[in-house]
Each structure stands twice: as structure tokens, then as C-alpha cells.
Image (tube, rainbow, N blue to C red):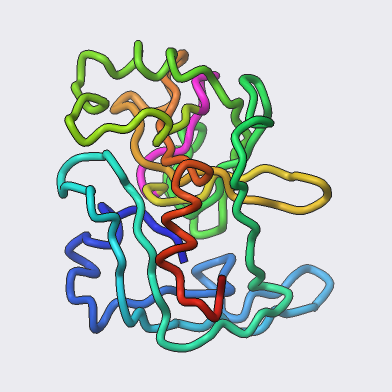
Amino acid sequence: MIASPHFSRSPSVRNRNRSSVRVGDYDTRTDPDCGSTGFCAPVAINHAVSQIIVHPDYIEGQYHHDIALLILRTPINYTVAAQPICLHARKQDLTVGRRVQIIGWGKLSTSGTKSPELQTLEVPLTSWDKCVRAYASTGALQSPQSIDGEWMCAGGEGRDACHGFGGAPLIIRDAGRYAQIGIMSFGAETCGALNMPSVYTSIAHYAPWIEANSPKAFV
């Protein structure tokens, strides 16, 4: 599983032997999750994490190389509620203006509270220059560890994913299937402000590192 180091190394999961990920959940208030038709999905499963592989150039407290792999102790049994997602390893078709989705259980700028249900927000891909202008004064993008192309920029329409979305996937629908293109890295303190997009770690940029460090059984 792909995550952000500032999530995977947070105090709640700093004890790596006890950290876990929950697979197959939609509404954190109910288990199993049932629809209005009476159909219920399989119960969600907590999978223990056996290892957290953090990018070697990541520095705690910064956002450069903000990517990590969570290696699970047991394999995931795929169900109607738990499916893998493809990784989008090319940049050529990720053009400015293309509509993409951020998903997670955090708080949206359009809502006053964090939702227990999985949230989805559609945003546009924006030019990298827009993120550079938005965050130049913060110094967040400046570091000797920075590499051209490691990030991508999305949002800025006056709504955004806020607290609780760190490490969440940015996805597209490509050739009839969903693919992950980014990982939420950081955003503005004034979340959802017009012309203040968020910054995402680029899956395409780190695809070779992901493949090289993934268990061979899953590559």
C-alpha cells in the first residue's frame, strides 16, 4: 500500500509493530456497511503492517520525497468492497484542466465537520507554476532534496480536501478503470481558498521506486 511518510510516521502509528490498515470500509459508524436495498458488504478487515518503507531521501518535518510503502503481514482478499487500483506511470496525459478525484475520510472545505463516510471531491489538475506562486513564501517547496517533477498540483477552484486527507489518493478514470496518479502531500492553511491548490506526490515520478521496493509477489 502507498502512503505519505508524515502519516505513516505519525504518533498514532509510530510503534510499527502495532500499526495496521483497515480494508473494505465505507462508513466508519457501521460494520458491515449495508445499502438501502438490503445488500451488505463483507465486514472490514484490519491488516497488520509488517514493514514501513520510507523513501530514503525523505526528511521528517518536510514534504520532499513524501512517499512510503506499507507492507502488510497478510494478503488482502479482494471483495466488492476492497479492490486494487492501478498506478498511472505516465505523465503525458495528465494535462492542465483534466478533472481528477481526491478520496478519503477527511474534512472537505464545503463541509463544517469531518464525515464518517468516504468522501469524494472532483478537482482540476493545475499548472505547477500555480503551486509555486501559492507556496513560494512558505518555503515548503524549497530544499536541496527537491527533484523536478516529484510533485503535481491540483485544485484551486474554491473548494478542497482539508484536515484528515493527508496521504489520500488522487485518482483518474482511464480507459474504463480507475488509476492513482498522486498522494496528498500538503495544502494551504486556508483550505479551499480560491487559487490555492494542493500539492500531491507524483505517482508517475516515483513509479520505478515503488516497483523496486514492492514485494516481488505483488509486482
Q: Residue 192: give x, y in percent of width and height.
A: 44, 25
Magenta-colored span:
154-164
In terms of depth relative to the viewer, which is nearer, 111 or 22? 22
Count of marks placed on residues:
0
- Would you say 140 lies left or right of 35 here? left
Quarter in which the C terminus is drawn: bottom right
Along the line of sight, the residue nearer the viewer: 135 or 65: 65
Name the residue at 59% across, 50% down.
180
| 162 sits to left or right of 204 | left
Residue 144 image point, x, y percent: 17, 30
Q: Residue at x 38, y 69 (%)?
A: 70
Q: Main secondary structure of the magenta part?
A: loop
Image quarter of residue 151: top left
Q: Position of residue 175 (x, y in %)?
A: 82, 46
* 86 up-or-down from 45: above or below: above
Asked whether, in this view, residue 41 is left or right of residue 46, the answer is right
Q: Is residue 13 magenta?
A: no
Please give the name of the residue rendered at 51% of the width and 50% of the height, measured from the top-left corner.
Answer: 169
Q: Residue furthest bottom?
A: 74
Please, is residue 126 above or below residue 82 in the view? Answer: above
Q: Is residue 121 above or below residue 190?
A: below
